[in-house]
Image (cartoon, rainbow, N blue to C red):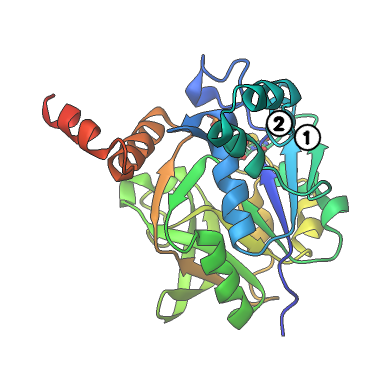
């Protein structure tokens, strides 16, 4: 049986240039969708998948995330004094047991692959998950849980994929699909940001992965890939053929919250599903 996935890397060291000026002093991962920052959705999805150790790869200007997952003593004291129990509970109940979240710095934003490599000492020789917090996926169960279930059957490496329009392949990693069983597809090749004419399929990789620790050996080569960055896709591609490698066509709605349009549609979708706000929001949209 495959070794259980108990660790996750959440890379949060990107510059978030598509969201400037909002992301000049505030990390992209602290942008809220309704009332919750993106990073908290990712942590909650990981916990719901049975993952114990959460590793954030941070960079400059990202300290606020450490504060977010810590007590806010002054706030808690005031809420207590004022008897605001519900607000106090929201602030406290999201905290994880001490020691479950670790932070490691990516000192230069050299790419997603480099960010993952920065966590190699914390991962050790265990399989691990990766989630990109700006890829928000609404689904029940959460995508990481769907992937852990697939991993328990298949072992090896699992990546989440979805079908995209051919003209959009140049924004994603794209797989060469092999044998299919339901929503699980063997991966025979992987290429980062292919031109639509060269894309081997329209199955695109989104920000959820379960990987074997050997991927770190390939990241160690620090090969420069698409966009002049150290790409995770290139290191994953080296595992294909040596280890089981599958794509899971996850169930859920995915929003690229690193883009303004994606973030806006995530907010609208969540708002129209919110029991308190839904009617008001629908009324407003219909009036436009
Ligand atoms: P993106 O491709 O969205 O890049 O990164 P970005 O820099 O965050 O945003 P833009 O494109 O400039 O607007 C995907 C994920 O990889 C992380 C990001 O934080 C995000 O979770 N990342 C990217 C790093 O941690 N380090 C890097 O060097 C690059």
User: Quick check: is the Cβ at mark 2 less than 8 Å away from ligand 1?
Assistant: yes
User: Quick check: is the Cβ at mark 1 less than 8 Å away from ligand 1?
Assistant: yes
Report which quarter residue 73 is drawn in: top right
Q: Quadrant of ligand 1?
A: top right
Viewer can see residue 227: no
Residue 22 in the image, given as x and y percentages of width and height:
52, 17
Residue 121 in the image, given as x and y percentages of width and height:
88, 52
The structure residue drawn at horizontal position 36% and vertical position 52%, both measured from the top left corner, is 197
Residue 265 left/right relative to 4: left
The structure residue drawn at horizontal position 49% and vertical position 31%, both measured from the top left corner, is 32
Disc 1 and disc 2 in contact, CB within 8 angstroms:
yes
Secondary structure category for the residue under label 1: loop
Q: CA distance from mark 1 to mark 2?
A: 7 Å
Query: Would you place residue 178 above or below residue 87 in this image?
Result: below
Give the farthest residue toward the left: 287
Q: Which residue is mark 2?
A: 109
Q: If the image is split into quadrants, where does the N terminus sit?
A: bottom right
Residue 11 in the image, given as x and y percentages of width and height:
67, 42
């Amino acid at each position: 049986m495959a070794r259980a996935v108990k660790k996750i890397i959440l890379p949060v060291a990107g510059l978030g240039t598509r969201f400037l000026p909002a992301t000049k002093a505030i990390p992209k991962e602290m942008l809220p969708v309704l009332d919750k920052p993106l990073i908290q959705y990712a942590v909650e999805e990981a916990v719901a998948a049975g993952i114990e150790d959460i590793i954030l790869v941070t960079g400059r200007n990202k300290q606020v995330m450490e504060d977010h997952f810590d007590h806010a003593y002054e706030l808690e004291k005031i809420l207590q004094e004022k008897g605001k129990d519900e607000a106090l509970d929201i602030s406290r109940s999201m905290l994880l047991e001490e020691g479950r979240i670790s932070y490691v710095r990516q000192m230069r934003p050299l790419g997603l692959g480099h960010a993952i490599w920065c966590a190699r000492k914390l991962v050790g020789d265990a399989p691990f998950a990766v989630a990109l917090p700006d890829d928000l996926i609404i689904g029940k169960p959460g995508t990481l849980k769907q992937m852990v279930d697939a991993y328990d059957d298949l072992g090896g490496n699992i990546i989440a994929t979805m079908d995209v329009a051919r003209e959009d392949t140049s924004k994603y990693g794209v797989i060469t699909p092999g044998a299919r069983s339901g929503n699980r597809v063997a991966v025979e090749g992987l290429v980062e940001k292919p031109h639509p004419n060269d894309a081997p399929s329209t199955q695109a990789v989104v920000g959820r992965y379960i990987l074997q620790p050997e991927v770190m050996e390939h990241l160690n080569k620090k090969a420069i890939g698409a966009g002049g960055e150290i790409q995770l896709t290139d290191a994953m591609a080296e595992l294909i053929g040596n280890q089981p490698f599958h794509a899971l066509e996850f169930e859920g709605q995915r929003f690229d919250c690193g883009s303004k349009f994606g973030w806006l549609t995530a907010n609208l979708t969540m708002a129209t599903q919110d029991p308190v706000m839904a009617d008001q929001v629908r009324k407003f949209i219909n009036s436009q």
